[in-house]
Image: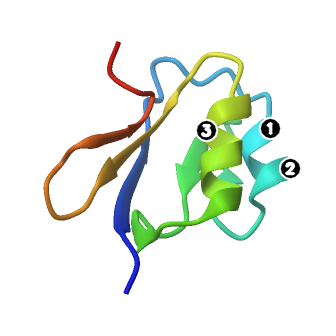
């Protein structure tokens, strides 16, 4: 059994580039204000979601391990 993730978007950072929707259309949507929202905040680890987080120009997508809260993305420096 794989990791489970908690996915959130920091809407104070989100600029509505829609890169997340482009890379993971089944995981994110933009609201009428062009702010991103995860469709399912608790999800199985998923390469598309990680790619969406990595390509977000302002790193507004935060991924943590559901069980421990340990950061997946962005990585701790």
Residue closer to the observer: 30 or 26: 26
Residue closer to the observer: 57 or 71: 71
Q: Residues within 10 Å of mark 1 (few under 14, many from 20)?
A: some
Name the residue beneath numbered marker 2. 22
Foreground mark, 3 or 2?
Answer: 3
- Residue 28 is at least partly visible in this image: no
Q: Residue furthest left?
A: 68
Marks 2 and 1 in Cβ contact (< 8 Å):
yes
**Residue 53 numbered mark, or none:** 3
Label 3 – label 2 distance at C-alpha: 11 Å
Q: Residues within 10 Å of mark 2 (few under 14, many from 20)?
A: some
Picture colour scheme:
rainbow
As helix, strand or loop, the secondary structure at mark 3 comes to: helix
Q: Quadrant of the N terminus?
A: bottom left
> Residue 68, position in %: x, y?
13, 55
- Residue 71 is at least partly visible in this image: yes
Q: Is residue 18 above or below residue 2?
A: above
Q: Earlier in the sequence, mark 3 or mark 1?
A: 1
Q: Quadrant of the C terminus?
A: top left
Name the residue beneath numbered marker 1. 19
Label 2 – label 1 distance at C-alpha: 5 Å
Q: Residues within 10 Å of mark 3 (few under 14, many from 20)?
A: many
> Residue 63, position in %: x, y?
41, 45
Q: Residue at x 18, y 48 (%)?
A: 69
Q: Quadrant of residue 47?
A: bottom right
Q: Earlier in the sequence, mark 3 or mark 2?
A: 2
Label 3 – label 1 distance at C-alpha: 9 Å
């Amino acid at each position: 059994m794989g990791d489970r993730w908690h996915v959130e978007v920091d809407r104070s950072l989100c600029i509505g580039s829609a890169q997340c929707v482009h890379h993971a259309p089944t995981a994110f949507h933009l609201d009428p204000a062009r702010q991103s929202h995860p469709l399912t905040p608790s999800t199985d680890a998923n390469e598309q979601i990680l790619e969406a987080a990595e390509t977000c120009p302002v790193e507004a997508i935060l991924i943590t391990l559901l069980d421990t809260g340990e950061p997946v993305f962005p990585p701790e420096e």
